[in-house]
Amino acid sequence: MEAAGLVARADSVNNVFGRQPGGSAPWLLVGSHTDTVLAGGRLDGAFGVMAALEACRALSDAGHPAAPKVEVVSFHDEEGAAGGGGLSGSRALLRDPHVDELGGYLEIHIEQGPVLESEGRELGVVEGIVGIRRLNVRMEGEANHAGTTPYAARRDAGAAAAKLAWQVRDILHGVDPTMVGNAGVIGFEPGSPNVVPGGATLVVEVRSLSEQSVERACEAVHAAAKAAADDFRCRAMVEPGLVIEPVHMDPRFIETLVSVCERNGRPWRMMSSGAGHDAGALAARLPAGMLFVPSRGGISHSPLEHTDDRLLVQGAQALLNAIVEMTDPLVFDPTRN
Ligand SMILES: [Zn+2]
């Protein structure tokens, strides 16, 4: 940041901020994170920081009036690779008085999914970040000899849990074809090949940008758990687990990003993000907006993570155009806070 002519500082949790000397609050914060997952790629996070830095440098070099209104950020510990839930840098900023000096947050990131590439689109405008809901399901039957117990006499909790796990996909599709989910954890008790499982647990997770869809899906999974238990003469207990509410990006930021993508002239689309981002944490306090560039093969959190240079540069250019529009007082109105 200093090499780009910015005044840089780190806050108490090691978020790094940089801005052109001589500006004054409020700033439009632009950036992403520079930590990664273990054995991650080079783009998840770092691309957004580099694109923000490059946009800021281009504006400074051009003597553009937007330059002193921008602050670049590299957030600390977005992924939570050291333990914890991640987003700790952006969440710490929400508790720091500096947040009051900010008028909004803009982030560009790789998609981390296959949608843009498979549709031949080059930019994505993020509407919001999906909410997550987990249900902890327990099936209770009766452990018994796996060889001597006829089917009619069994109370097979494993079969009931497996039936529900198999049904999750169809249940969710029936509620809302855009939502996703799965049973990602399953366990049988006592867990022996020669014993009919007397108990089974599974965790069902559903994700959607629509709170209503999440709600309806959880009700449907609950009903299906009871029905699957009945089929195998078991009892189902369904307890609510993790809840993360969906986050919506700021409508004016979305509008600006849409107009930037329209003027860019290459294919783009609106989309939700199935992964969490710093923009999601900051949206609790600041108007936030987010752009995606395609991920080759939809791969991320892997050294194979890749986006062609042309698409990275185009994304950075779109980010710069959005900064210019958003620092126009008509769009960038900190009095809203
Ligand atoms: Zn990331």
Image: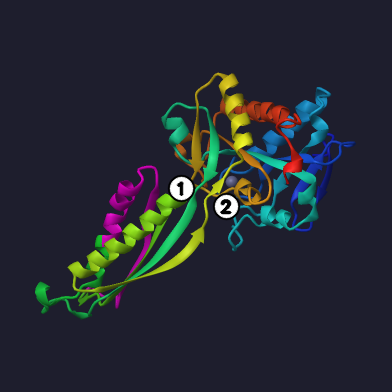
Mark 1, residues whose alpha carbon is within 10 Å: few (<14), some, or many (≥20)? some
Residue 69 appears left or right of 191: right
Secondary structure under the numbered disc 2 in the rendered image: loop
Amino acid type for the residue under numbered disc 1? Ser
Q: Who is closer to the viewer here, 288 or 55?
A: 288
Q: Is residue 72 visible?
A: no
Q: Position of residue 255 (x, y in %)?
A: 60, 31
Q: Position of residue 292 (x, y in %)?
A: 56, 35
For marks 2 and 1, give the one nearer the viewer: 1
Q: CA distance from mark 2 to mark 1?
A: 28 Å
The span shown in magenta is 164-193
- Residue that label 2 marks: 37
Secondary structure under the numbered disc 1 in the rendered image: loop
Q: Residue at x 70, y 27 (%)?
A: 325
Amino acid type for the residue under numbered disc 2? Val
The disc, 2 or 1, on the residue closer to the chain's N-terminal end is 2
Instruction: Please say whether residue 186 is one of the residues in the magenta stretch.
Output: yes
Q: Residue furthest front?
A: 336
Q: For residue 72, what is the image quadrant?
A: top right
User: Ligand 1 closer than 8 Å to the CB at disc 1?
Assistant: no
Q: For residue 50, what is the image quadrant?
A: top right
- Residue that label 1 marks: 210
Instruction: Name above or below for residue 150 compared with residue 168.
Output: below
